[in-house]
Amino acid sequence: MLKIRQICLNFPETEERLNHGMPAFAVKNRSAFVFVQESKQRKNASIWFKALREVQEELIEQDPDRFFAPPYLGPAGWAGLRLDIDLDWSEVAQAMEEAWRLVAPKRAIKELDEATL
């Protein structure tokens, strides 16, 4: 969870809060990612993140052992990533950035883009 927290809180204007008792990360009250520990359906730790439906479908198709459509949020395009397997942390960070960009205000996106130049 510490590594997930570091990645998520590195994005401008991102705050951690509880969402149904689980750590979640939001930008201006718009959720981008939710950490889920021991979900009933998956029996393992995972992070759910906002994604475009096409991206969600592509991730699940490419690697169904790692990615899944989470309950409740899956129909809205969110994707889930299992954390109990060997992870490529740069891939995790990229997925979190894409989720963040879907909810972040333009000024925050500009701030991140300028910081990474």
Image (spheres, rainbow, N blue to C red):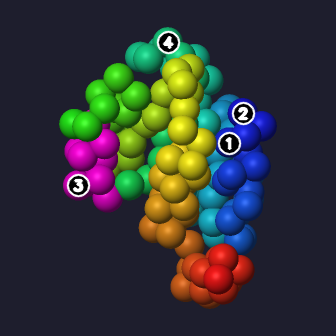
According to the image, label 3 marks what residue?
A: 54
Between disc 4 and disc 1, the foreground one is 1
How far is disc 2 from disc 1 in space, using C-alphas?
5 Å
- Secondary-structure class at tag 1: helix
Q: Earlier in the sequence, mark 2 or mark 4?
A: 2
Q: Look at label 4 and name its amino acid.
A: Lys
98 horizontally vs 38: left or right: left
According to the image, label 1 marks what residue?
A: 4
How far is disc 3 from disc 4 in space, using C-alphas?
26 Å
Q: Which of marks 3 and 1 is nearer the N terminus?
A: 1
Graded by Cα atoms within 10 Å as few (under 14), some (14 to 19) or many (20 or more), the crowding at tag 1 reads some
Marks 3 and 1 in Cβ contact (< 8 Å): no
According to the image, label 2 marks what residue?
A: 1
Asked whether 58 falls inside the magenta stretch, the response is yes
Which residue: 29% across, 53% down? 55
Which residue: 73% across, 40% down? 3
Q: Earlier in the sequence, mark 2 or mark 3?
A: 2
How far is disc 4 from disc 1 in space, using C-alphas?
19 Å
Q: Position of residue 79 (x, y in %)?
A: 39, 42
- Secondary-structure class at tag 4: loop
Q: Which of 44 and 72 is in front in this view?
A: 44
How far is disc 2 from disc 4 in space, using C-alphas?
16 Å
Asked whether 37 falls inside the magenta stretch, the response is no
According to the image, label 4 marks what residue?
A: 43
Magenta residue span = 52-60
